[in-house]
Amino acid sequence: MLNTLTLIVSATITTMNRILKCTKSNLKDAAGSLKAGNLVAFPTETVYGLGADAANQGAVARVYKVKGRPTDHPLIVHISSIDRLEIWVRDIPDYAIKLANSFWPGPLTLILSRSNLAKDFITGGQENVGVRVPNNPCAISLLKEFESLGGLGIAAPSANRFSKVSPTSAADVIDELSLYLSVNDIVLDGGRSIVGLESTIIDCTKSRPLILRPGGITNTMVTELLGQTIDINTKHTGARIKASGLLESHYSPNAKIFLTGTPAPGDGFIALSKVATPSGAFRLISPSDNNEYARSLYAAMRFADSMRITKVYVCLPEGDDIAVAICDRLRKAATKSIYE
Ligand code: TXA
Ligand code: MG
């Protein structure tokens, strides 16, 4: 009886989540809704974010609840342009200004010392805050509408349940979160994310930049811009992990991911198109290059889960481009397979 009731309530909530196209009037409504304290999931070029008014403690608390994420994992604040950076941060090193000028809008998050406005409920109690200008017309229009209402920034983690695969379409967001969103929350549909993996995160709080999470802005791009070699965070530093994406078993589908070995008939298989499908394996994607690989990877993992495929074998891509980020996410997803 209770189960039936739960199902009915869940189904009702599911159908009531509002998915809106990114038209001017919908964006106005979404910005107003954010300002009123509701949540708005929105597209970015990396993945979809679950947005809340970054100055509204109650709204931000709901983000954590909807995601099922521990509250000491900080959120990224999204702004419409570099001109608004100083609202949220202070003591910006020259190299960080260079990075922002060159790669924003784009798949890059800068961690900087926080201003008084970046409260503990955003930063998880840390003295720094992550900020990003996304490169997506829908996200930028939403931010501008929100800012025109007096909003200062949109706090947004990826719009998935904690430790699961990030969504790269509005339908993915609904799959992940519809049971947890409420009737006044909105999902903006801006098509598929074109990068497909979460932003590069660079810690800019020290004299030298440190890459915490690889993404679309690569180590090579940063090195070329700054004319110096860049440090990359290695995974087991022993320090308390404050960035959830740095946890070993993040980005996991239900299927087990294997980075070595041969698939049995019916197992999933992911590799660049130049790699032949092993006999009997279920080919999930055949991307022609590393960018397409990144763009389609999370959708492939979701598809495997929807097909009840329990094992997925993956050939890691090579290169110093976005391949580094693909390998990072796949190794994290595979950790579950190794340690379970
Ligand atoms: O591409 C992206 O970055 C997407 C889109 C929506 O912008 N957002 C995203 O947010 O991936 P999230 O919260 O799912 O992942 C951001 C990661 C988390 O691991 C978080 O803990 C870490 O960045 N992070 C955020 N602020 C930080 C800070 N101040 N210091 C260290 N890590 C931080
Ligand atoms: Mg995430």
Image (cartoon, rainbow, N blue to C red):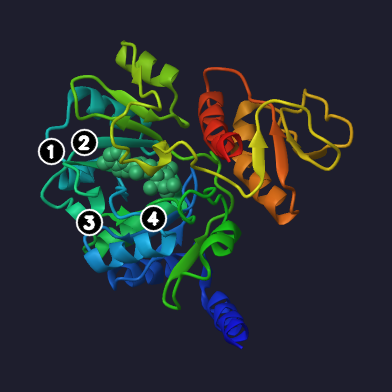
Which three-letter amino acid code belongs to the residue tagged 1?
Answer: Arg
Mark number displayed over residue 90: 1
Q: Quadrant of residue 218?
A: top left
The answer, for residue 290, to whether it is visible in the render is yes
Which marked residue is nearer to the observer: mark 3 or mark 1?
3
For marks 1 and 4 on the same chain, the one whose residue lies earlier in the sequence? 4
Q: Residues within 10 Å of mark 4 (few under 14, many from 20)?
A: some
* Extreme-front residue of the structure: 340
Which marked residue is nearer to the observer: mark 4 or mark 2?
4
Q: Residue at x 31, y 11 (%)?
A: 228
Q: CA distance from mark 3 to mark 1?
A: 18 Å
Q: Quadrant of residue 85?
A: top left
Horizontal relation, residue 280 to residue 175: left or right: right
Q: Position of residue 286 (x, y in %)?
A: 75, 34
Horizontal relation, residue 6 to residue 198: left or right: right
Q: CA distance from mark 2 to mark 1?
A: 7 Å
The verdict on label 4 being within 8 Å of ligand 1 is yes
Which three-letter amino acid code belongs to the residue tagged 2?
Answer: Leu
Q: Are the two marked residues, 2 and 1, in contact with CB atoms closer than 8 angstroms?
A: yes
For marks 4 and 2 on the same chain, the one whose residue lies earlier in the sequence? 4
Mark number displayed over residue 112: 2
- 84 lies above or below 180: above
